[in-house]
Amino acid sequence: MSHAIARLTAPEVAARIAAGAAILLPLGSTETHGPAAPMGDYLLAEAIALAGAEAAKAAGDDALVLPPLPFGGEDFFRGVPGGISLTHATLSGVIRDSLECLRAAGAGRLLIVSGHGGNIPAIEEAQRRFREAHGQVVPVLHLWREVTPLLAGFGVPPETIGHGGNPVLGTALHLFPELCRPWALAPRAEPGQLLGHPVSGFGTVRVGGVNLGVPVTIQEIAPGGTQATDPRGATAAHGQHIVAALAAAIRDGLAAMKEYPA
């Protein structure tokens, strides 16, 4: 049984929605993930959503997966060659319109599956406006934010963690090895400086022992797209653990929404 709405006929989708199937909306981006992983991380979000639908099926539930939104909200990655960033207003509007269409078609359980940090403000705006309009809560699973604290338990070396490394790189190596170029991996180059001090994170510079928020670019914090200290130790086995954990999270989230509708 397929879970991908794009691969099903309209009567099949309508019947499953009428029977109580949940709908997953995967979001990602088209940006740099360094020299080894594909730019389209929305492919990973879609694959994880499909894995979550399979996990739900094994638990006796049903879920359908929409085609992923391939462009993320604007942040550090604006201007990356080949990348597309949407303003938060545009992305939030697309998400809100999508949710409205799904509600009008009778979908009761909706879950957003997001694989890009720049999507967070737009998603939060759409969630709030949708709840205000309809009293319906639409949760979101922020994939990389939620799985990163679990990586140590999967045996992931800490130096591989960060942009251009795990968790995205391991996940890509597991799901789409044919799209990856692991031989191109190299240790991180030194980040840039702002205000005469080193850029310390995505949106921060270290001054006097504290971090100040600043509008950094990807090249300042992750030259060449790599912010992980040394991503060369990332493996497909890491990605297998990551996907399994996220699929289980989707399954459990759908079960909670079914038991306690809001």
Image: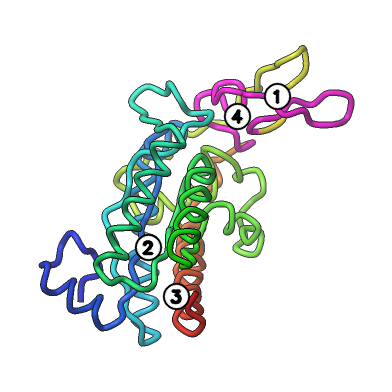
Residue on which the image places disc 1: 199
Residue 24 x, y percent position in the rendering: 36, 64
Element type at mark 3: helix
Mark 4 and mark 1: span between their CA atoms?
Answer: 14 Å
Mark 1 and mark 3: span between their CA atoms?
Answer: 39 Å
Q: Is residue 28 magenta?
A: no
Q: If you read the primary sequence from the N terminus, does the residue marked by circle 4 or circle 1 appear first?
A: 4
Q: Where is 252 relative to 180, above or below?
A: below
The quadrant of the picture occupied by the N terminus is: bottom left
- Kindly identify the amino acid type of the residue bearing the numbered disc 3: Leu
Camera-near label (4 vs 3) is 3
Element type at mark 2: helix
Residue neighbourhood size for the residue with mark 4, other residues' Cα within 10 Å, grouped as few (<14), some (14–19), many (≥20): many
The image quarter in which residue 20 lies: bottom left
- Kindly identify the amino acid type of the residue bearing the numbered disc 4: Arg
| Colour scheme of the rendered structure | rainbow
With 77 as the anchor, is 174 left or right in this view?
Answer: left
- Kindly identify the amino acid type of the residue bearing the numbered disc 1: Val
**Residue at 48% of width from left, 51% of height from top?**
170
Residue on which the image places disc 3: 254
Element type at mark 4: loop
Q: If you read the primary sequence from the N terminus, does the residue marked by circle 3 or circle 2 appear first?
A: 2
Q: If you read the primary sequence from the N terminus, does the residue marked by circle 4 or circle 3 appear first?
A: 4
Which numbered disc covers residue 188?
4
With 50 as the anchor, is 240 left or right in this view?
Answer: right
Q: Which residues are magenta?
A: 202-229
Q: If you read the primary sequence from the N terminus, does the residue marked by circle 2 or circle 4 appear first?
A: 2
Q: Where is 56 relative to 201, above or below?
A: below
Mark 3 and mark 2: span between their CA atoms?
Answer: 12 Å
